[in-house]
Image (tube, rainbow, N blue to C red):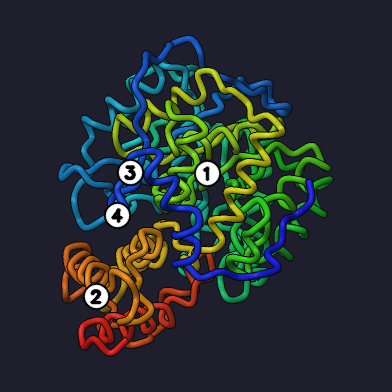
Amino acid sequence: MKNTQNNHTITRRDFLKTMGVAGVAATGLSACGDNTNTSVSGEIPTDGMTYRTNRSTGDKVSLLGFGMMRLPSVGGRSAREGNEEIDQEMVNQLVGYAIEHGVNYFDTSPAYCRGKSEHATGIALARHPRHSYFVATKLSNFAPASWPFEASQAMYHNSMKELQVDYIDYLLLHGIGMGDKPMEEFNARYIDNGMLEYLLEERRAGRIRNLGFSYHGDIRVFDYLLSRHDYYQWNFVQIQLNYLDWKYAKQINPRNTDAEYLYTELQKRGIQAIIMEPLLGGRLSNVPNNIMARLKQREPEQSVASWAFRFAGSFPDVLTVLSGMTRMEHLQDNLRTYAPLKPLTDEEFRFLQDTATLMMQFDTIPCNDCKYCMPCPYGIDIPAILLHYNKCLNEGNIPESSQDENYRRARRAYLVGYDRSVPRLRQASHCIGCNQCSPHCPQRINIPGELHRIDAYVERLKQETL
């Protein structure tokens, strides 16, 4: 399939006028509001899950993988937000329901949920026979203090303790390609300290059944590790793949790499892929109203999110697709998509690529709400600020001029929503530009630059000087 490039630009207002009005009217959607659509009714079979076979070990892996990054808190939100504790009972329920309906791959990390995800995952999984699930975790030795061999080894052994297991099914080198000096950091974390050689020995001993890495950022590191595949014999590689990033990841952010390239390079070498961010941190379930109308017109009974999951799951060399499911309705909707999977047709694939081209008309900030930039030393809620901006952009509530049609409504929607979404003391106006956040961002966003831009825009809205 040829890449569709934009040879002209249109304004957001023109796009809303030419595409959105008819689509919104056809589906009965309001012009502004919460677009999240992850709930579709219908019975969920307990024996319908689609499985893929791991060519290294013969594991029958559920195509839906449970990402334990966004576990529910006692306050009902994701435990990645604020300081609320994980709701262990709800985690137990979600994990039990997932296993009952055929999910057997659970992905966590020492870095998730403020360091508490592995512990909660271990408690939930220990309620089930060890043969009924595969557990994946990561060596998340990002901090220089964890680079010495003894510290990295201790992190690895602590993961087994927290997960209550004596072997790990899938171990990942975490976040390869991140940082200001990606190759130097990779060498410091895994090569210079002898840690990767140690993990290879652990795989030979059977305490690691599959060894791979999760890739973010610098393509040179990705290409280098694949060039050493004959030596390392990677069992799998985790990449970001969705219908927007398939051809537009680099256009969204020049430091990213299109998923088409990543998947194809793995496929050439017979390495199966595990998929992260199939929804781009929720952006592909909370799409602009116009895009939602387009998807719902095509499949009224199918959730918006299911399109993204079908896209990721339709590639034959994908072993499993991870989803961070905070609420039961998220899990149930994903189960409906993968129990069983209805692979995309060629025509549906083209339809989603055309949809991605339309979405590129919106100049959103590529924040996936991963919260790797947090905590901010000055208390700023970085993801909430960026996501509120994207939400308003998607809904047509970023007025460019006081002469814009519906300027008053859009101005009020942005300012009122900003104060509701982000407490005043955590807003962009408090950013001093220390830049402790940007090096941790997998999407390579210039976070201080975006915060200062948003703050200046908010001030113009308040002063009505647009």
Residue 448: image location, x then y, percent: 41, 81
Q: Nearer the viewer, residue 192 or 221?
A: 221
Residue 135: image location, x then y, percent: 49, 32
Q: How far apart are marks 2 and 3 (CA)?
A: 30 Å
Relative to residue 207, is residue 233 drawn left or right?
Answer: right
Numbered circle sitting on residue 32: 4
Q: How far apart are marks 1 and 2 (CA)?
A: 29 Å
Tell me, yes or no, whether the two marked residues, 3 and 1, touch with CB atoms within 8 Å: no
Mark nearer the viewer, 2 or 3: 3
User: What residue would you read off at disc 1?
Assistant: 278
Residue 452: image location, x then y, percent: 36, 84
Mark nearer the viewer, 2 or 4: 4
Q: How far apart are marks 4 and 3 (CA)?
A: 8 Å
Numbered circle sitting on residue 427: 2
First in sequence: mark 2 vs mark 3: 3
Residue drawn at point x = 36 percent, y = 59 percent: 395
Q: How far apart are marks 3 and 1 (CA)?
A: 25 Å
Q: Distance between the residues labelled 4 and 1?
A: 25 Å
Judged from the image, the secondary structure of the residue bearing numbered disc 4 is loop
Numbered circle sitting on residue 29: 3
